[in-house]
Amino acid sequence: MASITIRRLDDNVKKGLRRQAAEHGRSLEAEVREILSRSINQSSRAPQPKTGLDLIRPLREFVDKYGGVELPIPPRTAMRDIPDFSDRPKKSRRRK
């Protein structure tokens, strides 16, 4: 196992770590090992992929907070006919 030495550590940081270690029933050294291990394990995880709900949620929260907008729904109309291009002259595709 490897060892490290941390120089110029602020006294308040060391006191806080010692207090935190005592709360968890560990030595200062064991507490620091746990913090470092947890930090590495959390940062090495790939971020979860975003879903459609993640993209919509901020918009939904905004609408819930400020209210929505009522948009008129246009009446349905018949589809227009698909144009027939069969009578158009074809262009030649010559390379220059």
Image (cartoon, rainbow, N blue to C red):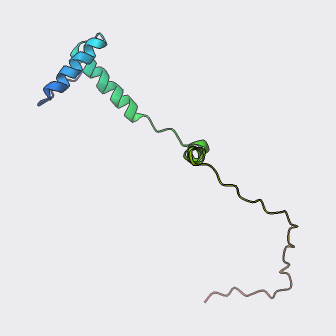
Q: Quadrant of residue 21?
A: top left
Residue 4 visible to an observer of this rendering: no
Q: Does residue 54 lie above or below 28 as drawn?
A: below
Q: Quadrant of residue 74?
A: bottom right
Q: Quadrant of residue 30?
A: top left
At x 18%, y 23%, the residue is 14
User: Which of 70/43 is in front?
Assistant: 70
**The C terminus lies in quadrant:** bottom right
The mark tally for this picture is 0
Residue 25 visible to an observer of this rendering: yes
User: Which of 37/19 is in front?
Assistant: 19
Q: Does residue 70 lie above or below 11 as drawn?
A: below
At x 39%, y 34%, the residue is 44
Query: Is 67 left or right of 47, judged from the image as shown?
Result: right
Q: Position of residue 75 (x, y in %)?
A: 83, 63
User: Which of 76/70 is in front?
Assistant: 70
User: Which of 85/79 is in front?
Assistant: 79
**The N terminus lies in quadrant:** top left
At x 51%, y 38%, the residue is 48
Q: Position of residue 59 (x, y in %)?
A: 57, 48
Q: Does residue 34 lie above or below 60 as drawn?
A: above
Query: Is 47 left or right of 28, judged from the image as shown?
Result: right
Q: Position of residue 56 (x, y in %)?
A: 59, 46
